[in-house]
Image: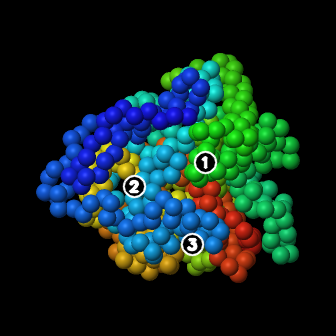
Amino acid sequence: MMWKNTGKTIKGPGQFAYQLCFVRDFSVGGIFNQQTHLDYAEASAPRADEKWQQAKLYKDIPGPSSLRMISYFMPGGVLYNTNLIQMNRRMREMYGDIYSMPGLMGRPNVVFTYNPEDFEVTYRNEGLWPIRIGLESFSYYRKVQRPDVFGGIGGLVSEQGQAWADIRNKVNPVLMKVQNVRQNLPQLDLIAKEFVDKLEAQRNPETHHLDNNFHDQLKMWAFESISFVALNTRMGLLTDQPDPNASRLAHHMGEFFNYSFKYDVQPSIWPYYKTPGFKKFLKTYDDITEITTNYIEEAIKRFQSQEEGQTNCVLQQLLGLNKQVAVVMVMDMLMAGIDTTSSSLLTILYHLSRNPEKQEQLRRELRRVLPDPQGSLSEDSTKNMPYLRACIKEGLRITSITPGNFRITTKDLVLSGYQVPRGTGVLMGVLELSNSDEYFAKSADFLPERWLKADSAPGVQACPEARSRNPFVYLPFGFGPRTCIGKRIAELEIETLLVRLLRSYKISWLPESPMQYESTIILAPCGDIRFKLEPVQDS
């Protein structure tokens, strides 16, 4: 690996010098050049306006030096063995509502801010092509290792600039269009039914406890669901005889999450030297690619014999755009749609299990949606579920799967009175603010009513005054052009399974301690996860 300097250095009024371009060369002979994030931003002159001139210098933002930052993560350090929530909380306690963390291993410095006015400034100035640090291993594998499969396409997670916009503009009409996503409801409902049937077979009829790991079971549900949406294929993961390739793929997806946290999130030397561990990571990528492309080829054969006039599924529409785009998007959907969805649903279920009166209020709504527990959900019956959707929002407010949203600044900004030069990373700590009484009254309480616009049913009183008036404080799926592309799919999957679970069972939390979380690419529930599932008796 080497760093190339274009020689373009700018000093703004705060005398903070930064490079406008560097190139990361990941391969012998320079096959793959990773441009700096600034290369993707629109050119803009350094600021010289009064607000910028009056702002404090970037170097005056509180924060540790590089050596001190490293020491924090060493055994005995204040951040040793902490997850992302704990790390952000301790750093905020030490340095305040804005602080800077030095970039390591060639990554940009990151400013952490807990000021919603800064959130708005950052988002309002992100431009048409927002820049967010992606997973560099994605780009390396797809562009260097396997250009034969991906044709130089890195995907929405890792691409920036025009390349990112080209893909996003193509797939938005497919994945963000409500009708395209909701056409999957009948099959997703069937998958949810099968999942509940499997839980019933594992449930002890005397104690109402489950014999198997509930979180692992949820991951299989999430994988079965996203596989149908992305591949138009049932994997059989909820049966006793799953497709062997599907089981292998599920295993490799679990490995991918662990490897990606190690090599894409934590500081790593892999851009300089391909370690044996990183080579195992590439082998996992190879296995995922092989299995996924085989499923796509099988689906293409089925589509060729499909009668004309049938509605095209998501995969057919993606293939109609470009086969390589389809392969990339399917793999991204599978990779992103397992741990994120299962962790979100588990978190929401945990909060409902700890608040039985809210759970019972939700069940009253669900009895209207699904009078017969064995009936089928439909487009019409699921249109009006305000309390369910409020419960989902409230669960993700208290514990989102990420502690904040990230952007690389494409312009010189003033955040909390400090100069933040173009090219700096900004992490907006939404999770901390979502759990603050300053922005949400009774923030520690699970209060779905704060999200209701009007009284949705007898005995339910809306209290929108209990939520923040600042729309930038609660953004579980991001904001703007880089809003999560899988938002509608995840919402549909979560809604469908919650209807089935809570229509069938009264769910209680068994451990004495609260739900614990660990850091992977996301915040994932861990530790002792046990629920009591008592069958609901309809009068």
* Quadrant showing the N terminus: top right
Q: Measure how far apart labels 2 and 1 are at the Cα level.
A: 21 Å
x, y (%) of residue 534? Answer: 75, 72
* Quadrant showing the C terminus: bottom right
Q: Which mark is residue 426?
A: 2
Determine the residue positioned at 70% across, 53% down: 219
Amino acid type, mark 2: Val
Out of 531 and 475, give the one closest to the viewer. Answer: 475
Q: Is residue 502 above or below residue 298?
A: below
* Image quadrant in which you'd find residue 148: top right
* Image quadrant in which you'd find residue 361: bottom right
Q: Measure how far apart labels 1 and 3 are at the Cα level.
A: 21 Å
> What secondary structure is marked by label 3?
loop
The label nearer to you, 2 versus 3, is 3
Label 1: how many Cα within 10 Å (few below 14, some 14–19, many 20+)? some
x, y (%) of residue 370? Answer: 61, 59
Determine the residue positioned at 67% across, 47% down: 259
Q: Is residue 1 above or below residue 62?
A: above
> What secondary structure is marked by label 1?
loop
Which residue carries the number 1 mark? 268
Out of 136 and 445, give the one closest to the viewer. Answer: 136
Amino acid type, mark 3: Val
Residue found at the far left of this picture: 50
Q: Find out whether the residues at labels 1 and 3 contact each other: C-beta distance under 8 Å.
A: no
Which residue carries the number 3 mark? 78
